[in-house]
Image (cartoon, rainbow, N blue to C red):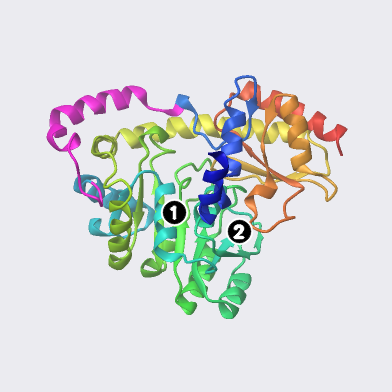
């Protein structure tokens, strides 16, 4: 039976069944592992008392619609309050142009279905988010990597790609990028927007971490510069709770219709009950009250990790120092093999993500790694970094 199933599997599923994400989750679920691998929010940041109170409020006020089938595009009250919510970011979006999805990962899947045929070209940063690579890979596109620097995608490199290739869409994470933590400056965003506008293509702007800023100035999304050419994605996973599986997107009328069609064939609609919790979370002011608590926890953990890296890591290694987000990107000397070292680290009950998984072309990023600091105590961060540095020194 196994051989028969293998013989009828699609090419798409063969592409993604050995996903790096699956391996990461398998490893980090082992209780003895100190994990710097997954991008999980800390349970301590989940507003359980608020959610409990809001759940009761939803039952009392919205029970007849919260427990019923709902609109594919999402609960109108939530879409309207997200429209107001986004104005603080500079995004002027009518509620009719906002759609709700079961996590922004679902939006990536739908956009892939809508736009990609096998062998189509799509442009992504090098490195880029593993989940996006997996979502896009199912439909077998040709990945075109955009060279990056300390601010992310380089405008001149993007323009060269658009000038020489037909690109279906561009995928960027401009704020606290996964995996590097890098953020584009305002100047860089203007330059990137100008290039995209010039070549009349589409940008998917993924913004899951924008509210997790620990210092510095908030940057307006690229969407504010080219709204008609941008599909903006965001999520409640980092500011409420990931288990609710609530994401949303902003898109023009035509793309919204296509997204609606894709979602109708998938799960019809996202949980109404969870949507009403998110609505009340914003409406009651609970979000603004709770966000500083999240930031306070993560800011301390990030500082602890950066201090530990400075104290224990070899001097020929370098790392990003993000102003927010969830990740730190480490680069070692050319002879450092992070995948080989990863297995040594697992033997010593420490996990991270080898950097090569964030590149779409082989033989890249072998000397890099991604560390997460959000879902681990400060004491364990210090212990893990100390252990990891000792392992690296023995294997380099």
Judge the density around disc 1: few (<14), some (14-19), many (≥20) Cα neighbours within 10 Å.
Answer: many
Residue corresponding to mark 1 = 108
**From where the camera sits, is residue 346 visible?**
yes
Judge the density around disc 2: few (<14), some (14-19), many (≥20) Cα neighbours within 10 Å.
Answer: many
Quadrant position of residue 55: top left
Is residue 395 depicted above or below 188 in this figure? above
Quadrant position of residue 229: bottom left
Residue corresponding to mark 2 = 152
- Region in magenta: 45-74
Q: Is residue 52 within the magenta segment? A: yes
**From where the camera sits, is residue 177 visible?**
no
Judged from the image, the secondary structure of the residue bearing numbered disc 2 is: strand
Judged from the image, the secondary structure of the residue bearing numbered disc 1 is: helix
**Between marks 1 and 2, how big is the CA–CA gap?**
20 Å
Residue at position x 54%, y 64% from top? 141
Residue at position x 63%, y 54% from top? 127
**Nearer-the-camera pick, 164 or 301:** 164
Is residue 365 depicted above or below 283 in this figure? below
Position in image of residue 38 (x %, y %):
57, 35
Position in image of residue 21 (x %, y %):
57, 41
**Nearer-the-camera pick, 345 or 183:** 345
Quarter of the image for the C terminus: give it: top right
Choose the circle earlier in sequence order: 1 or 2: 1
Q: Is residue 217 left or right of residue 145?
A: left
* Magenta stretch: helix, strand or loop mostly: helix
């Amino acid at each position: 039976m196994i051989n028969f199933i293998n013989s009828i599997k699609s090419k798409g599923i063969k592409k993604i069944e050995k996903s790096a994400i699956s391996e990461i989750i398998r490893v980090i679920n082992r209780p003895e592992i100190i994990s710097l691998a997954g991008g999980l929010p800390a349970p301590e940041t989940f507003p359980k008392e608020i959610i409990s109170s809001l759940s009761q409020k939803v039952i009392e006020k919205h029970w007849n619609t919260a427990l019923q089938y709902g609109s594919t595009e999402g609960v109108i009250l939530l879409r309207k309050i997200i429209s107001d919510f986004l104005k603080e970011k500079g995004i002027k979006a009518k509620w009719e142009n906002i759609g709700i999805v079961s996590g922004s990962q679902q939006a990536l899947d739908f956009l892939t279905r809508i736009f990609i045929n096998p062998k189509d070209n799509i442009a992504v940063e090098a490195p880029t988010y593993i989940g996006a690579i997996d979502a896009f890979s199912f439909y077998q596109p040709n990945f075109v990597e955009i060279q990056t620097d300390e601010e992310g995608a380089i405008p001149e490199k993007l323009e060269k790609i658009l000038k020489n290739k037909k690109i279906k869409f561009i995928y960027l994470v401009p704020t606290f990028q996964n995996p590097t933590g890098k953020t584009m400056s305002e100047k860089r965003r203007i330059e990137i927007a100008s290039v995209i506008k010039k070549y009349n293509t589409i940008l998917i702007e993924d913004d899951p971490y924008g509210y997790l800023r620990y210092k510095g100035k908030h940057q307006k999304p690229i969407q504010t510069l080219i709204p008609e050419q941008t599909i903006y994605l965001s999520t409640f996973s980092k500011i409420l709770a990931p288990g609710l599986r609530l994401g949303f997107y902003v898109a023009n009328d035509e793309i919204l219709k296509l997204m609606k069609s894709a979602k109708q064939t998938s799960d019809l609609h996202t949980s109404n009950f969870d949507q009403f919790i998110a609505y009340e979370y914003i409406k009651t002011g609970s979000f603004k009250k709770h966000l500083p608590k999240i930031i306070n926890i993560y800011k301390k953990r990030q500082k602890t990790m950066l201090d530990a890296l400075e104290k224990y890591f070899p001097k020929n290694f370098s790392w990003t120092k993000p102003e927010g987000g969830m990740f730190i990107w480490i680069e070692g000397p050319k002879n450092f093999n992070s995948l080989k070292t990863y297995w040594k680290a697992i033997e010593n009950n420490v996990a991270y993500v080898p950097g090569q998984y964030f590149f779409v072309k082989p033989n890249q990023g072998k000397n890099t790694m991604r560390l997460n600091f959000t879902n681990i105590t400060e004491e364990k961060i210090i212990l893990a970094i100390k252990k990891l540095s000792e392992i690296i020194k023995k294997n380099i």
